[in-house]
Amino acid sequence: MTPSVKRSPWGAKRLVEARAFDNTGQELPPPFGPQLALFEAERMVGIAGDARASVPPTRRLMGATITGRKRLSESKLERDARRNAGLGDIYVDTAAEPWINFCPGIDFKLLRTSQETGAWTALFKCAAGSSFARHEHLAAGEYLMLSGKMEIRGGAERGGVTAKAGDYGYEANGMWHDDTCFPEETVLYFTNFGALRFVDGDDNTLAVVDYKMLREIAEVGRQKLAA
C-alpha cells in the first residue's frame, strides 16, 4: 500500500491519494483499494500530527494484505451479514399476534415503537360504528387502509376524507380531528411519529397517547389474554 498523506492546518489527517495492492502486486479495484488505503493512512497519522507512526512498514503492509485477502474472499452473503450485524431489523408475524383492546370497539396490534424518536406503528381493527375520539396530532402520521371505510372530519360529504381499502393518507403535525368514524368493520395500518392528544369537546386533555402508553396497553392486554 502506498498512501499519500497531505498535512492540513489540523495535522496530517487529510487523505489526498491512496492506492492498495494485493500480495501479487496487482492493484486492488474499488471498493477494496480505497477502504484499505484509508485504513492504512489513519494508522500512519501520529498523535502529534506526524505522518509516520511507530508501526513498522512491514507490519502495515502485512496487515493491509491480510485484510485485503479476507474481504476479497468474502461471499455476497457474508459481506451483507458483516454490514448488517447489530443493526436490529424487525420482523413481526402479524397473523400470530393477538388483537388487544385499545378503546370501545377498536383493537390493535402494536408492531413497533421507538424510544429514540417516539414513533410507533400499529394495525387497528375497528368495528362498524366505532370511532376514535377527538384528538390533536402532536406529530405527523400516515395510514394505509387494508379493508373497510374510515370517515375523517365528517367524511367526503362534509368536506373531510372518506378513505376506503387501498387508500393512503398523511396527517400533518398539529392536525385536529373530531370523531374519526368507521361505518363498517375496518382494518388499517397506522404509523405516528410521536404522540396523540385526546381531548373533550372543550379541548381539555383527556389522555396523551405515546409509545410508552401503547407499550403498557399492549402488555396489560397480553397478560389478560394469558390469564
Image (tube, rainbow, N blue to C red):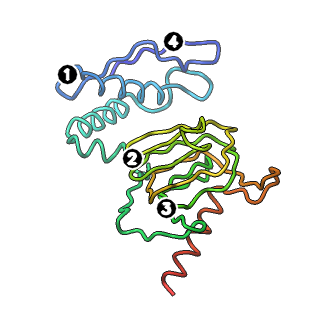
CA separation in Å, label 2 and label 1: 62 Å
Q: Nearer the viewer, residue 156 or 40?
A: 156
Element under disc 3: loop
Which residue type carries mark 4?
A: Lys
Residue placed furthest toward the bottom: 227
Circle 2 Cα neighbour tier, 10 Å, few/some/many (<14 / 14–19 / ≥20): some
N-term-proximal mark, 2 vs 3: 3
Place of residue 48 in the rendered image (x, y in percent of width and height, measured from the top left):
62, 25
Which residue type carries mark 1?
A: Gly
Residue at the spot of label 1: 25
Which residue type carries mark 2?
A: Ala
CA separation in Å, label 2 and label 4: 61 Å
Residue placed furthest toward the front: 157
Element under disc 4: strand
Residue at the spot of label 3: 128
Residue at the spot of label 2: 165
Closer mark to the observer between disc 4 and disc 3? 3
Circle 4 Cα neighbour tier, 10 Å, few/some/many (<14 / 14–19 / ≥20): few
Q: Nearer the viewer, residue 189 or 161?
A: 161
Residue at (60% x, 38% y) in the render: 158
Residue placed furthest toward the left: 24
Residue at the spot of label 4: 6
Residue at (83% x, 51% y) in the render: 202
Q: Nearer the viewer, residue 54 or 31?
A: 31
Circle 1 Cα neighbour tier, 10 Å, few/some/many (<14 / 14–19 / ≥20): few
N-term-proximal mark, 1 vs 4: 4
